[in-house]
Image (spheres, rainbow, N blue to C red):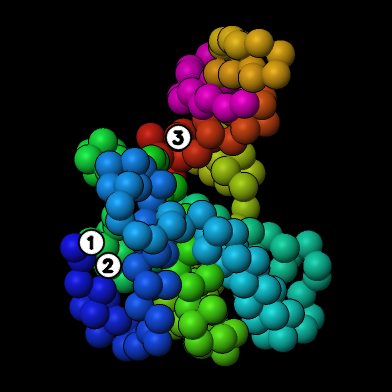
Amino acid sequence: MKDFSLLEKQLNLKFKNKDLLTQAFVHRSYLNENPKFGLFHNERLEFLGDAILEQVVTDYLFLKYPKKSEGELTSWRASLVNTKILAKTAQEIGFNDFLLLSQGELKEEGRARQYVLANTFEAFVGALYLDQGLEKCQYFLEKYLIKELPRIIREGLFKDSKSRFQEEAQERVRLTPSYNLLEQSGPDHAKRFVIGVFLGDNLVAKGEGSSKQEAEDKAAEEALRIKKW
C-alpha cells in the first residue's frame, strides 16, 4: 500500500479524511484486481474536481485580467485545464508514484498515462474540496497549476495546434500547411479519421481522431513535435 503521508508532507497538506485522499488515486482498473480494496474508484471525485478546477481558474482569470476579452480568457482557461498541462503538473508534484493501477495499466506510458495523471489531478482537487473547502483548492491550484499561465501566454500555448503550426510554417518556411484525409474507417456512429498535414507535397505528420477536426489538430500537434517548433 502507498504511504500517502509522504505526499501530504510533499504538498504541505493534511487531510482530515485519509480515505478521500487515497480514493483520488484509485483507478477503476485497480479494483478489478483488488475487489476487496474497500474504497470506490476516483471517477466521481474527478467529476467534482473538474468543476472546481474550472471555477477556480475562471475566478482567477476574471479578477486578475479585468481588461481581457471573454475570448482571450476562454483560450487561457482551456490551455490551463487541458490534459497535457494537468498531467505535467501532476507528474511534477509526484502523483505518478501514488497511482493505484492494475498491472496492465502500470505498463502503459505516453498518452495513456497522461490521461490517467490528468484525471487523477482532477480527482485530487475534488477530494481536497470535500476535505478542506474551496479556499484550500484555490491556494493549491495557484501554487501548482496557475503558475504555468505566464509561460503559456509568453509561448502562445493557448493557441490551438493548427494555428500554432500554421504561424510557425509561414514564418519559418513560407508555406501554409494543408490537411488531407488519408484513411476513414468504422461505422457511422464510431468513425475514425486519419488526416495528414502537408507542407507543399511533403507529408509532415499524421493524426487520428473521431472527427476530422480532432484528427487535424492531432496531426498539427505531432507536426510541431516532429519539427521541434
Q: Secondary structure at mark 3?
A: helix
Question: Residue at image x 30%, y 52%?
Answer: 36
Q: Are marks 2 and 3 in contact (CB under 8 Å)?
A: no
**Residue 160 seen anywhere in this rendered image of the structure:** yes
Q: Secondary structure at mark 2?
A: loop
First of labels 1, 3 by sequence position:
1
Q: Nearer the viewer, residue 113 or 163?
A: 113
Residue pointed to by mark 1 = 97
In the rendered structure, which amino acid carries the disc numbered 2? Gly
Question: Residue at image x 56%, y 86%?
Answer: 133
Q: Are marks 1 and 2 in contact (CB under 8 Å)?
A: yes
Residue 38, above or below 215? below
Q: Nearer the viewer, residue 32 or 211?
A: 32
In the rendered structure, which amino acid carries the disc numbered 1? Asp
Q: CA distance from mark 1 to mark 2?
A: 6 Å
Residue 63 in the figure: left or right of residue 128: right
Residue pointed to by mark 3 = 222
Around disc 1, counting alpha carbons within 10 Å, would you say few (fewer than 14), some (14 to 19), or many (20 or more)?
few
- Which segment is the magenta one? 195-210
Residue 223, above or below 58? above
Question: Residue at image x 27%, y 67%?
Answer: 94
Around disc 3, counting alpha carbons within 10 Å, would you say few (fewer than 14), some (14 to 19), or many (20 or more)?
some
Residue 76 in the figure: left or right of residue 221: right
Around disc 2, counting alpha carbons within 10 Å, would you say few (fewer than 14), some (14 to 19), or many (20 or more)?
some
- Observer-side mark, 1 or 3, equals 1
Q: Secondary structure at mark 1?
A: helix
In the rendered structure, which amino acid carries the disc numbered 3? Glu
Q: Which mark is residue 94?
A: 2
| Residue 93: percent from left, percent from top | 31, 71
